[in-house]
Amino acid sequence: MAVASPAVGHVARAMVAVLTGLVLMAGNASAGLAAPKPSVKQLKKELAALSKESDRLIEEYYNGRRAQQQAERTEKAARERLAAAQEVYDRESLQLRTLAVAQYIGGEPNQVALFTASEDPDGLLRRLALSRHLIDVQDARLRGYAQVRDERRKAEEEAAARSEELGTAVADLERRKEKAEKLIERIRDRIDELYTAPGVRRPDGTWVPQLPDGSENITPRMRLVKTLIKERFAVPMGIGCYRTIQDGGEHPLGRACDFMLSHGGAMPSPAEVKRGYEIANWAIKNSRRLGIMYIIYRQRIWHSRTGTWRTMSNRGGTTANHFDHPHISVY
């Protein structure tokens, strides 16, 4: 057997050391990449912190709304004062122009000139007294005009200031509202992540069917989906699930619910149509974790197998074509 020289042994030991270091580095990198998932306790702690921050932002939002309403009232009062000042201003301007014309032609409107060549002394004195009186009236009107002009200018400046204040308040309010809404959405997403559909999921992504139970006659999986949607989107027009009509769907099996957006087969309002899209998008986002099989909304169907929407045939009505509700079926 050949014996390795000291030099060769030294190189071998160096290579082992280098390889060992690389293995340790790789292990550390892998540990860093595969960070452990947060526990339910950690998620609940984070949710509590987010909820507290959300409450603070919502309080700021409502405080901002009150400030906005006060600014609107102040601006309205300023505009009313401006309108009143403008009315007086216009009236005084007309009177001032009338006086100016009368002064130019030598007397008050609809009167002859103050002086005539044949005027007797007593008449002249009476005319002079009248002239003095008219000058006093003119001075008073001039002073009144100046006051009205100043009040009008002040009202204009105040209205402009209130309008600017209102614009600033509205812009700030919108920013805070948007921030609060985003934070609330994060909180809701975190809450959703705490739940996974009950039951057994097969390797191909489908789930083992469940039997309905409880007074609603729906499966535990459907009940979870219904509860989460009700808490998140309210659905004020009601939710219909189990029904006995055998139509080939999942309602008689307790595996489907309709989330109504209007009553009596009427077309829903734009706000409710938007709510329907939000429910459908939420169901798609959480379909794998919650065992959602397919969604029908506005004459289209989305199936978890394909992950895409396709158009459905016309079934002859608002409700039959699912324009007034999203339908969700679970495995």
Image: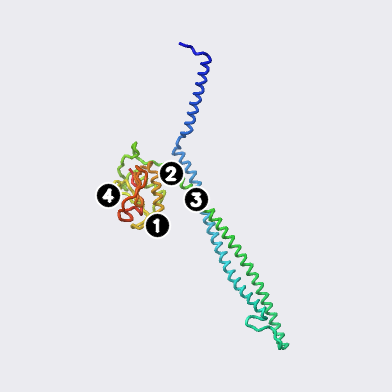
Q: Nearer the viewer, mark 2 or mark 4?
A: 4
Which sits earlier in the primary sequence, circle 3 or circle 2?
3
Instruction: Determine crowd level at label 4: few under 14, some 14-19, many 20+ residues with C-alpha closer than 10 A.
Output: few
Q: Nearer the viewer, mark 2 or mark 1?
A: 1
Distance (Cα) linking label 3 and label 4:
44 Å
Which sits earlier in the primary sequence, circle 3 or circle 4?
3
Q: Quadrant of residue 146?
A: bottom right
Q: Is residue 314 above or below residue 205?
A: below
Q: Indicate the secondary structure of the residue bearing disc 3.
A: helix
Which sits earlier in the primary sequence, circle 1 or circle 4?
4
- For mark 3, what is the residue? 178
- Disc number placed over residue 191 in the picture, else none: 2
Q: Are marks 3 and 4 in contact (CB under 8 Å)?
A: no
Q: Are marks 2 and 1 in contact (CB under 8 Å)?
A: no
Distance (Cα) linking label 3 and label 2:
20 Å
x then y, percent, for residue 243: 29, 50
x then y, percent, for residue 140: 67, 74
Residue lying farthest to the top in this orientation: 1
Q: Indicate the secondary structure of the residue bearing disc 2.
A: helix
Q: Quadrant of the C terminus?
A: top left
Scheme of image coloration: rainbow
In the image shown, does 298 or 194 lie closer to the viewer?
298
Which sits earlier in the primary sequence, circle 2 or circle 1?
2
- For mark 4, what is the residue? 247
Instruction: Determine crowd level at label 1: few under 14, some 14-19, many 20+ residues with C-alpha closer than 10 A.
Output: few
Distance (Cα) linking label 1 and label 4:
28 Å
| Kind of residue sitting beneath label 2 | Ile
Distance (Cα) linking label 3 and label 1:
23 Å
Q: Quadrant of the N terminus?
A: top left
